[in-house]
Image (tube, rainbow, N blue to C red):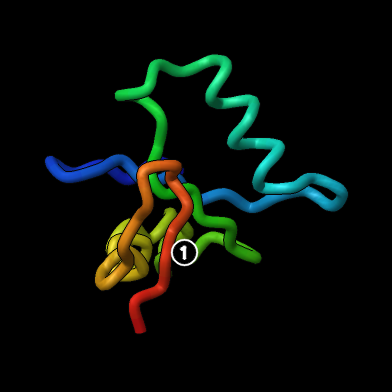
Amino acid sequence: VVVGSANCVAAFVVLKAGHELEELRSCLRLKLADYEFPRPILSLPQLPMTPSGKIDLIALKKRLSGLRVETDGVPVDES
């Protein structure tokens, strides 16, 4: 799921067993232009869902608040 705003594009992923987040980043860097590359890319155990079964975008955006992102797209927790 990609959540965008005027400030950044963030991607939330649920990785399959045996796959690494760095592997995904490397693959995306080969396929996307720099301005298209999501910063940050966050791995979750599962995506939050609304009671109606849709992806809860509000819950995902709340995960971004207070998160600082380095230029390489790696999130840094400021708490």
The residue furthest bottom is 79
Answer left or right for 51 relative to 26.
left
Residue at x-position 36% and y-position 68%: 63
Instruction: Report which quarter residue 60 is drawn in.
Output: bottom left
The residue furthest right is 18
Quarter of the figure with the C terminus? bottom left
Answer left or right for 66 relative to 55.
left
Circle 1 residues within 10 Å: few <14, some 14–19, many ≥20? some
Q: In front: 51, or 29?
A: 29
Residue at x-position 71% and y-position 37%: 23
Residue at x-position 41% and y-position 49%: 40
The residue indicated by pointer 1 is 49
The residue furthest left is 6
Under mark 1, the amino acid is: Met
Answer left or right for 9 relative to 74.
left
Residue at x-position 39% and y-position 16%: 33
Count the marks: 1
SS class of the residue under badge 1? loop
Is residue 48 positioned above or below 10 on the image?
Answer: below
Residue 69's spot in the image, x, y percent? 35, 55
Residue 56's spot in the image, x, y percent? 38, 61
Is residue 47 positioned above or below 34 on the image?
Answer: below
Residue 31's spot in the image, x, y percent? 54, 15
